[in-house]
Amino acid sequence: MDVLRFALRKLLAGVPLILGVTLLSFTLMVHFGPDRTFELLGKNPTTEQIAELRHQLGYDQPFLLRYGQYLRELLTLDFGHSDATGEKVASLLARSIPVSLALVLPGFVLGNLLGVALALLAASCRGRWPDRLIMAAAVFGMSISFLVVIFVFQIWFCTSHGLDLFPVRGWGMADVPDYLRHVTVPTLAVVFVALGYNTRFYRAVIVEEMERDHVRTARAFGSPPLRLFCRDILKNCAIPIITRITFTIPAIVIGGALLLETSFGIPGAGKVTYEAIISGDQPVLKAVVGLTAMLFVAALLVADILYRVVDPRVSLE
Amino acid sequence: MAGTALLSVRNLTVEFDGRAGRLRAVDAISFDVLAEETLALVGESGCGKTVTGLSLLRLVPQPPGHIVAGEVLLDGEDLLALPERALRRLRGRDIAMIFQEPMTALNPVFSIGAQLGTVLRRHQGLSRRAARARALELLEQVGIPEPARRIDEYPHQLSGGQRQRVMIAMALSCGPRLLVADEPTTALDVTTQAQVLAEIGRLQRELRMAMILVTHDLGIVAESCDRAAVMYCGRIVEMRTTAALFSTPHHPYTVGLLEAIPRIREERLADLPVIPGRVPDLAQLPAGCHFAARCPRATDLCREVVPAPLPTADGGLVACHHPYP
Ligand SMILES: Nc1ncnc2c1ncn2[C@@H]1O[C@H](COP(=O)(O)OP(=O)(O)OP(=O)(O)O)[C@@H](O)[C@H]1O
Ligand code: SF4
Ligand SMILES: [Mg+2]
């Protein structure tokens, strides 16, 4: 009950945040975004034609009114039709966002789980060879560009130069084998790239926690290493871990998958966004920007609630 | 059964890697703790009291610390040579430790009931329920008001004194034979200090435990300890029964400490140094006696040769070339 009330309050506190972010991005879009007038009218339009079209497009309306319309679009999730394809923006996103999620989530989850596990292992052997080995591997992984990883993995897993086990491009989620066939190589690439960063970050968090007095107390009372690291220490590290995870999610849902989607020819939200930017497809851009802002606020809320769950010192007030 | 040594520390030497190279925080110290007795470990800040206490259970942070030599014999068994697993079974069960910093010594994200229960289940093999019941009893015993409510609270909801009481409850939970209390009251306010000390003393007698009480408060030594070991720069310079130490201190450092008691009380405002001079930097210790630079009786011999601990007439020890009679 307390948690529910807390969530509601946080949600309300999120409203001004959403307003601020959307207002800012809407202003930027209106002033610097694409103006379709001349694109539609060709080379030598008359003044009347221009005025007429601008009226049709709604460009002549007062700023606040247009912003209000934008907010209504966000609330109803009805963003009109894509300028480029004429498809409804809502259905375009409903089609592409699940693909992005299905594409990125396995790698994201694995990358974080493995990162925490390796970080625990490294921290518990701090200064000894397993630690050095893991950290050296992490730096190696971090220093290779995502694009290179993708290409190497494609050649290695998907062509006759290597194992030739998976398709190079394309997407499918018809059934589980189909999904696995398409998601495996991108997942491996994501894990490879994220693992180094995650491991280093989580190890730093864990090592800092290891030096706290309560860890010494636990050892003084006979806590075995597995319990010490996976319970006594890990629960104390939960806040930075939750923060990192929740705040990466909005980014990967919308933009983060772009490189993967273009390299593997996957019709996800990253690609939709990219194409909308290139073609100046305002309805789509407005939707993406607004949804990203809302997703971030949601992440903030989820993180706040989780903080309370893992750390009794964080009060609900 | 006073008289037999429960714990024998022999030649314990602990070093730390630091920016200025290796420094020796504990330098070849030896002492015994008899069954049921209270041994005080006294000395100025940084003289190695905590490190000595931690070494007994091999809890010195490693790196940067290293126990480079010595034996810690509990009933004849060397804890420093014990495999990690065997040592874990002993920690908290045979030797328990209370720490200097009550505010941070407990885990902030688990309730105190959970933390007590964990230790009870581990060492006493109690079920979850039995452990909780026992934890309640223990909280009651150490004087926590409303234990039934407190047991589900988290450390941040308790005052410093209450947290230290929880630590005491945890330390006593498995009936250890030796309690190492590292300045258990330094971080507390004066009234709470007295209460907590009295509590520890009462429980010690009830459970017939031996105790090493680390402190730099000579008042506490006089009140509640049988013997005292005075430490200076990682070495024990004098170890006597409390009565003997206070009536006829032999070591010039002990004499300085004792003289400082009334001076601190009367002339606090004058801001006089307790003993003239400063504690030397552990990274640049002088050869010979570490106290020589501050000692009124120092001679050339002192600056060259380390004074060996020699037995005194009353069965104590003093490490000084020119002790007071
Ligand atoms: N974690 C550590 N890293 C490096 N050096 C340390 C560490 N812990 C202790 N030392 C060194 O060991 C010396 C003794 O420290 P110790 O904590 O035992 O002092 P103490 O007698 O308990 O002092 P206090 O009264 O302030 O608690 C210190 O001077 C310090 O140089
Ligand atoms: S050995 Fe010498 S310098 Fe050291 S305490 Fe004794 S008299 Fe003083
Ligand atoms: Mg100390």
Image (cartoon, coloured by chain):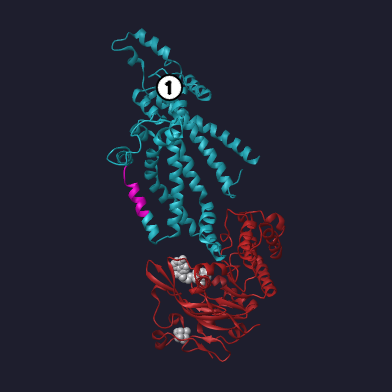
Report which quarter residue B185 is drawn in.
bottom right
Whole-percent x, y for residue A133 in the image: 36, 56
Q: Residues within 10 Å of mark 1 (few under 14, many from 20)?
A: many
Position of the N terminus of chain A by quadrant = top right
Q: Say which residue appears at 38% left-offset and 48% top-offset.
A: A196
Whole-percent x, y for residue B245 in the image: 58, 84
User: Can residue B45 be seen?
Assistant: no
In the image, taking residue A149 as reference, residue B194 lies left or right, namely right
> Which residue occupies the foreground of this view, B70 or B301?
B70
The letter of the cyan chain is A
Magenta region: A135-145
The letter of the red chain is B
Whole-percent x, y for residue A115 in the image: 43, 49
Give the residue furthest to the left. Answer: A161
Q: Amino acid at mark 1?
A: Pro
Residue on which disc 1 sits: A283
User: Can residue B312 be seen?
Assistant: yes
Report which quarter residue B192 is drawn in.
bottom right
Q: Is residue B102 above or below residue B8?
A: above
Position of the C terminus of chain A by quadrant = top right
Whether the magenta-drawn stretch holds residue A174 is answered as: no
In the image, taking residue A101 as reference, residue A277 lies left or right, namely left
Q: Is residue A67 above or below residue A116?
A: above
Most frequent secondary structure within the magenta stretch = helix
